[in-house]
Amino acid sequence: MSGLKHYVILLCSPALLLGGCRASRSSQSKDVVPFNVGDVEPVLGQGYDSLVQELRNSPNCISGTPAKVSSAASQINLGQNTSSDSLMREFSGEVKGTAKSVFLDVGAAAGFYRSLNRSSSAWNLVYAVRIDSGSEQLRAVTLSDASKALATPALLQTCGDEYVMQINRGGLLSITLNLDFTNEESRQKWQSQIKLSGSWPEVSKELSRKIENKAMDGTLTIKVNQLGGTPNQSLLAVRSCPLSTVEEFNTCKQRVDELMAYASTDFPKQVDSNPAVLNFVTAPLRNLGVAGLPTVSDEVLKIRANLEKLRQDSLELEAAVNLAKEKNVDMDQSMVNAVTANRDQIKQVAKSCFNYSLNSGTPDFGACVAQSNQLKANLRPINRASLDVNELAVNADSEVGNSVVNGSTDNMTIVYSVGDNRSWDYGKKIPVGIDGIPTDGSSANLSSNALSTSDKLGSLLVREGQSYRRADRSGRVEIAPGESISFVINDGLGDYGDNTGVQQVYWRCVNCRDGDQQRLTYRLRVKASDSNGSIYSRQADQSGVFHIAAYGKWRSSKFNAFTDPQGNNKACGSSCLLSSANSQSLVMKQGDTVTPIGKEAKTGIKPKERAYFLMNDGSGGYGDNQGEIEIILQCIKCDSLKSHSLILDPEENET
């Protein structure tokens, strides 16, 4: 079929898509009307009101001669897609002159474009095909005698200020593959290890090869969207499968293979016999000599632009509230009410500012201006820092789990909830839930060598300070400045290497404020067996005083007992980095100076000179060490550094 465009793969950057979009015109920025996007079934010559973006049922406004246009000439409005954003906007009906699609992704509420919400831990691949089957264009266009006789207000009400000049037909089909990893770190890890570009056979082979070597902590979800043809004959699909084994992945692979075959064979045939309206092109009535049509003032355009920004912010806040509800993270009702109230106020003002009334041909935006002036004062303040829900992936093979770190100067209280319907394996592939009860019907186990000897192996623990306890399904924890709490699987010390799987924890800060002062805060992981230690390097010109907190369990030999970073109660000896300090204690080496740290310390760190954190052990004795600890470094005396976010990998920032 001559109008069939080649498949394209679109690798989408992991950004959150939250409704809304913009079209453009040559003379000025064209804003899309918020809250009011209806079904679009255009007719050649039909009137169109560009202000409210609605077709006018006025068959007698324009006259002209319909003419067929070849598929090559039908690419006037939207051509071959080059990004998922433009593709999804076409499907959604949120772009001026775009037909609304028939959605095949079951349960999509507000259109495919809005349903494609992508978090920082997600990776989206969109395969799309577009078929242009030709167009209809209105030529030799003139105003009808009836419309010439109408005064300006009546003309706008009846005919709008534009008319449909061309209708482009064909079909659109997208196959969206959403790889949802447990956190952004996991996504970045796999993104650096695999090449997800090119045709689907190449991508599926690459995924299969990687999954054969090691399970991915993620899920693949397939969504299909079709416009044109016969949608009810399509392969309906919203299918998900875990990326833990090749067998599980093959369930999704088979469906994608079928969809790819459908897109290149049946779908073009369907569009040939049943093309849809892909988009339509309008032209202004003033091109036909209509005089006196009002324009929108710069003041109102500025108000509209501000409303659109407020609307985008409101959508993000609503998404945060909805995520908290979905993940069972406790949310203050007053905050929920504020988000809803603000949304309704913005919507009310938009109704005035994206419409107007005419009095003797003069547009009246008085209500728009008055309401927008009051809007800022009427909007309820919302503290974003205490609204956002954060994701925390807890890997089963990590001896320290994953942490929430307080990088501010004040105490931080968080509420959390553990994700549902996940299990992980410990030991010899024993699948358990967060309560440590095996999901295969076998007996639960305790161990005298576990992080928590009173809790079942495989249960989810929360660490506060140096103590471990069973994590509830949801809870509340307080974290002091420069410290952390961790979630970790309960297993025998030294036995974490064969664990698989991930649990997901969702949390938000209850008492954080947008203006809270942040300090330079680093998180490091130190393996007991690493004789070089973990590195911290400051690039600032002045020395800093740091509060250092260390957590976890390790040992210097399989013949020694595990201890916390304070070490055991005996001097390490002459062959150690610091002979007088405890064996198995945490020390810091900078230049020729070695400083004892232990579980907690306050110490200076020189600028532009690397500091090494490692276990205090005998020279050459690190090979049989076991365990890992976490270190939180917070600079409590860095006057030139006013506000900083948490930095997880300081080595990456070195010059």
Image (cartoon, rainbow, N blue to C red):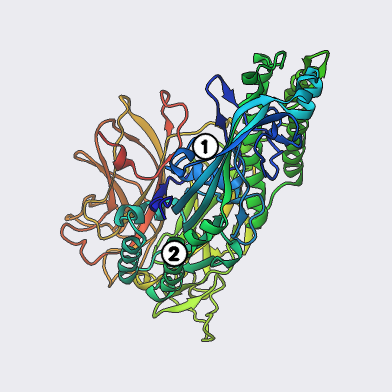
Amino acid type of the residue that numbered disc 2 sits on in the rendered structure: Thr
- Spot the residue most to the right: 359
Across and down, in percent, residue 307 comes to 67, 28
**Disc 2 target residue:** 265
Vertical side of 388 occupied by 583: above or below: below
- Percent across and percent down for residue 580 are 26, 51
Can you tell which quarter of the image residue 260 is in? bottom left
Which of 96/548 is in front? 96
Could you tell which of marks 2 and 1 lies nearer the N-terminus? Answer: 2
63 vs 91, nearest the viewer? 63
Label 1: which secondary element: loop
Q: CA distance from mark 2 to mark 1?
A: 58 Å
Near mark 1 (Cα within 10 A), the count class, few <14, some 14-19 or many ≥20, is: many
When the figure is inspected, residue 478 is found, relative to residue 519, above or below; the finding is below
Residue 294: x %, y % from top left: 71, 16
Q: In the displayed structure, would residue 134 be above or below residue 163?
A: below
Decide: few, some or many residues near mark 2? Use Cα within 10 Å; few <14, some 14-19, many ≥20. Answer: few
Give SS at disc 2. loop
Which mark is on residue 408?
1
- Whether 172 is drawn above or below 499: the answer is above
